[in-house]
Image (cartoon, rainbow, N blue to C red):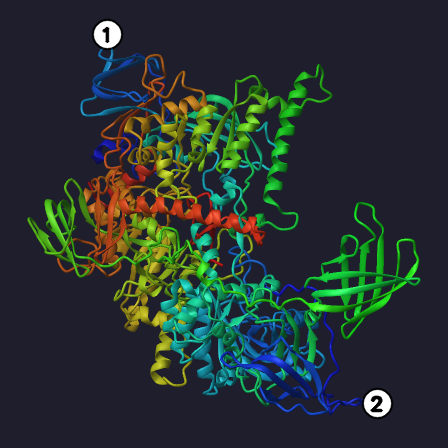
Amino acid sequence: MKRIFLWLTLVSISVATKAQESFPVNGVRDIRSGLYAFTNATIVQNSTTKIEKGTLLIKQGKIIAVGATVAVPAEAVVVDCNGKFIYPSFVDAFTDYGVAAAKRPAGGFNYGAPAQFISNKPGAYNWNQAIRPEINAYEIFATDETTASGYRANGFGTVFTHVKDGIARGTGAVVTLATADAHQSLIKTKAAAVYSFEKGSSTQSYPSSLMGSIALLRQTYLDAKWYQTKPVTEGTNLSLEAFNATQSVPQIFAADDKWSTLRANRIGAEFGVQYILKGGDNGYQRIDELAKTKASYILGIDFPVALDVEDANDARFVSLADMKHWELAPTNPAAFEKAGISFSISAADMKDGKQFLANLRKAVQYGLSETKALEALTKTPAQQVGVYDQVGSLELGKLANFLITTESIFNSNAKIIENWIQGNKYEVNAAEWNNYAGKYNLTINNGGTKTAYTVEIKKDLSANIIGTDTLAAKIAVNESLVKISFPEKKGRGAESIRLSGVITSGVWNGFGTDTKGGKLTWSANLVAPAAAAVEEKKATESIKLISKVSFPFVGLGNETIPQQETILIKNATVWTNEKEGNIQNTDVLLKAGKIAKIGKGLSEAGARVIDGTGKYLSPGIIDEHSHIAALSINEGAQSTTAEVRVGDNMNPEDINIYRQLSGGVTSSHILHGSANTIGGQTQLIKLRWGTTDEGLKFAGADPFIKFALGENVKRTTSANNNRFPDTRMGVEEVLTDAFDKAVDYQKAMKANPTTTRRDLELDALSEIMNKKRFITCHSYVQSEITYAMRAIEKFKQQGYDFNINTFTHILDGYKVADKMKLHGASAATFSDWFAYKTEVIDAIAYNAAIMHNVGVNTVINSDDAEMARRLNQEAGKIVKYGGVSEEDAFKMVTLNAAKALHVDNKVGSIKVGKDADVVLWTENPLSIYAKSLYTIVDGTVYFDREKDAERSKQITAERTKLIQKMLGDKKAGMPTRPAMPSTQILLECGDHEHNEGLNTIYETQKN
Amino acid sequence: MQKKFLSIFALALLGLTTSAQDNVYPAAPQRGIIVITNTTVHIGNGTTLTNASVAFENGKIIGVGNMAMPAGAKVIDGAGKHIYPGLILPTSDLGLKEISAGVRGSNDHTEIGENNANIRSIVAYNTDSKIIGVLRENGILLAGVAPEGELIEGQASVVQLDAWNYEDAAYKMDNGLYITMPSFMVRRGGRAAFMRPGPGNDPIKAAMEKLETIKTFFTDAKAYYQEKTHAANNLKFEAVRGLFDGKQKLFVRANEVKQMLLAMDLAKSFGFKLVIVGGTEAYQIADLLAENNVPVILDRQHSLPTMEDDDVDQPYKTPAVLQKAGVLFCLNDTHDQSRFRNLAFNAGTAATYGLTKEQALSAVTLNAAKILGIEDKAGTIETGKDANLLIVNGDLLDMRSSVIAQAFIQGRNVSLDNKGKQLYERYKHKYQLK
């Protein structure tokens, strides 16, 4: 929960210019016109119009005139702003000011805890507690002087505020930061509706993952549409009613991260909504993709501060990506400007509110134009939340929300003196009104003896008193009161003369005491004011950046995304996986992403030639079972979650993509976890290092879905499971019930296509039954393998002839290999796992060999980010355990996986016309001594062992430079924070332990 | 090839229950002389002999190389085979943990409490564990077995993997005390979320306090030994006398540089013989470890790199870094799903990434013997040592050919049968496979 840290500011509220007419008055009426004229100011009317020596006239909280030649009415209170700047007060389009902050329940999904299935919110609301469109910020808004003063000190006058809680958060209101009277502050009620991926304070188990949040929101859009048909079965659903009612106002999606904004935008595209996207500070890393959304953005500028990397050990655990982001984050707003993206700037993310203006100036220093910066703080946010007719510029009829500053707000020493909101004066740095700097004559009258001094006062009130000696004086000014003290003479232990008095129009006078306690009077007057501050030079050209954006944005990313090439591999031993078998001294030509030619003595003009002499060329490894490259894996809150899609939350920046390329993997099947009987939809990807989340996807592949059986779905390790099923008997019925329901659903859809509620879960189940989606099923023991097949085969009687496409884990598969073969299932298993849970006590390393020999299409997979780098060796073990031939063993990690995934027409063997997904190995690919030299996907070299070694050296050099730069920040006294290790988070399916790295942690979801 | 796996026991007992290995018997003591002839011998110390013989009598090796055939010797033709020393798994919970998830009753590896200096892994070592037979099948003949715990974990022992009971199994009892060095790393999120820094939750301070607990324990133990009479007997102090008189080693689980440096400091200040267990980041301070003669048991080779910026193969390359710096190290295998069986392949990986094959072999034989304090009787194929050896059809370190034909522990021809192989036979029978 980010919030503004407040610091002490002098706040005084001037007379309220309006009374609430409907309210009774206790006492005597005191109504004033609130007519003020601010004269001689440099008025920045909007981001492009500046008036020198201008006048701003306001009355009853509104602007009644602004310009260079405004007649000042005699009855106006005149405020001389000579030398000062006036700006429209800023607008923040994303705060939770004045609405109660929601508390988040601690932690994510707890695998072992009892589940809460239905919302516990009383009333006729949505089944899911995270869907709260009925919440309206305006109904609970109350002014809050502490928070408001923090925003005001940063120049804000108006904010959009909403309850930051839930996936559908309801509407927010626009309020000013005047705090005397909520009636006046609230200027727009249902200004915008807000959405996010976070379930917030909801205690309900579902959703427990990012992909679950996405599925829930998508289902809510469908439900709301269906609700418009007034379904009798639903009764009154106030949440859906509110959801429909709030579609007409601007829709804001709080996404923060660069990929999240793209994810949100895709949901918007699906349901015809153009969201305003609340982004974070890393959009510059994928600015081209962000520009393509055509969305307007809200950007935070809470740039990371330098890490304290003095301790070499601490520095060791900070990733290059974190260091680079520290350096580049201030370029984020400039990147948006350069890309022509509309955006506003919000202070709502600031952990330390005091840094807001400093960060704003930093953004300007790093390339953001002042014009754009001002627009992003005024016009754009006002437009985003529909209040540009009221605020966001200094124009006739708009609210009198403006700042008086000492100089251009972008100057590093500029101070906001006052922030006027709706005609109310809020002092921010009132002392800055008066610049006391200058030379004064001071006369002290001590019982008739007058002593004259010259006083030189600087802007910060440090001063020298020059008489016989030059003495340092202490001066303090509070409004019109002044205190001066200075030592009688030079040297240690000198006693002080203390003066106290009042400042009246340039003349200072008062009384005091001398060092002996004697009374005296004094006066001082200005002789010569100090020279005006020189307009500072902007130092944009002085910013030298060490870092460059890389794709992906991690140390081992590339500054340019690797491109497809024409490649001729000469004279290699080629393991084709085709009837030709393993052929020696053979050339393979890769062209336009495909395998173009296989033969001897090939040549191709312009091709990059790789000498394969003594090397082995094989098809790329396909990992049938992986959990890398995603942001969440398990939506474990319900027994059936067919609606969730792993593909909704891909993470193309997972370092394990690259690590697995180094082990010859070219495609991975990213499975949902095994927390429930019917898990989520899976995603087949190609390991295109540097691409986008969508770019990872294996185009044209059949979609799959994860099922699971056994100990995990019946929550064996939980001592207090309350989720059905708790036994294998129950698991079987969950399967039957799900498809039974899907049969009825399909009938209803056919009969009443417009009024039947579209259900994403049943859609997926229907796809399975109609062979448009295929099952990959986690399983262990022979009983469950058998009943799963039978449960599905039953539906043949109703005309649904589908099957379990692949059994994964399947360590008992050897016991029922004959039945699996008859059913037509593939088996994707581990080579030598055993004895890690009760259901694998009969697991044997000869499992794959038996299934293969019985005739089951057998695959060896990883389910483990580390082992995936050595899948070739895992296949090699099938030679050791059971004596399968080398060719057949290698197919278990290539062609057989392709068959199981229905992509054997595209990948899995070296055959003309297939995708150019190949690996060049140093040795026989089944050998432990084999290393991948090149891993090529679609004819693009994504891993090159020589280049990898070079890149490692570059990383060291870049890290060293950035560490030095961070140390420089620390030395310069800039803020730093303790170095936090850049932890690698790996997702697991919840089945077993993994061989983790020292700095790796496992979670069900990345935060 | 499959035929070689067949054991007479499996053939005899097909169709019986497969829930136990009650039909796999520990071998009887060796009587007489066995000579393996005409073979390639990988000594374990970096050298190999070709066309050589290995002779052993009553459990001890009596000759290696070219020798006259002893009278009455039983001859095994080793042509085309490779003879390796039996592999030594340096540290494990073998026999203490059978099924980790969901079966609490089968777990005896982690005791309650901060200081369990006196608990002994050997007494809970279950010789009937179904894991053991699988390890023999994969060439592992000796294993270090250590308790786990919060801080001072207890006494480890070395066992041989063909025994009726733990007293039979004991190869070197109570050879060292295990402690776990607290982590000095700030972490966020995930399983270690409780270590997130916050008020009163400074991981470095917490770790230093725990370290102080360890130091105080040893300081007090030293004082206790000076007492003429004790007010009360202290089992924990009594248990660590061996550390002070050099009969035991101090095994410290440490992966971070800070942990290792503090372990070195701890051992130095009490004059203990130190072994680092884990050593993920050992390559960062290889020179220091070598200078101070600190040996390392590298725990997880098949592991992901520590940082995303690290060389993708760093864990694989770490053994070569230690070898080059002159650190005495051995390799371990802790993968929780394959249960130590891939020890040989951890060595194979080290050979792929910088060690010679014979150096890699030493890392799972002689070096482990030295670190565990059993090099006088195990770790190499040399005259006078126990006949712990393997007859392998090919390269032990490469899965393509790592099939073990026979294994001997103290000269006993041990069974390579196990439950997995029996189930294999059972279902080959069902499907009528060859």
Image quadrant containing the N terminus of chain A: bottom right
Q: Which mark is residue A7?
A: none
Work out whether A515 lies above or below A382.
Answer: above
Classify A289 as above or below A829: below
Classify 10 Å Cα crowding around label 1: few (below 14), some (14-19), many (20 and above): few
Query: In the displayed structure, would residue A959 be above or below residue B405?
Result: below
Question: Relative to A170, does residue B386 appear above or below in the rendering?
Answer: above
Are labels 1 and 2 assigned to the same chain?
Answer: no
Instruction: Give the image quarter of residue A553.
Output: bottom left
Residue nearest the viewer, comparing B242 with A101: A101
Q: Quadrant of residue A927?
A: top left
Residue at mark 2: chain? A
Q: Which residue is mark 2?
A: A28
* Kind of residue indicated by mark 2: Val
- The residue mark sitting in front, 1 or 2, is 2
Is residue A271 shown left or right of residue A122? Answer: left
- Point out residue A714 in the picture as x, y percentages from the top left corner: 46, 56
Left or right: residue A254 versus residue A648 is right
Please state if A481 lies on the left or on the right of A398 as rendered: right
Q: Position of residue A98 (x, y in %)?
A: 65, 74
Query: Mark 2 falls on what kind of element?
Result: loop
Q: Secondary structure at mark 1?
A: loop
> Of all residues shown, which one is farthest toward the left?
A601
Q: Quadrant of residue B323?
A: top left
Asked if residue B415 can be seen in this view, the reply is no
The chain identifier of the residue carrying mark 1 reads B
Q: Could you say where residue A828 lies in the image, as x and y percent from the top left?
A: 30, 52
The answer to whether residue B103 is visible is yes
Label 1 to label 2: alpha-carbon separation: 128 Å
Q: Is residue A426 left or right of residue A809?
A: right
Image coordinates of residue A885 in percent, x first then y, are 19, 42
Q: Which residue does the numbered mark 1 point to in the structure image?
A: B71
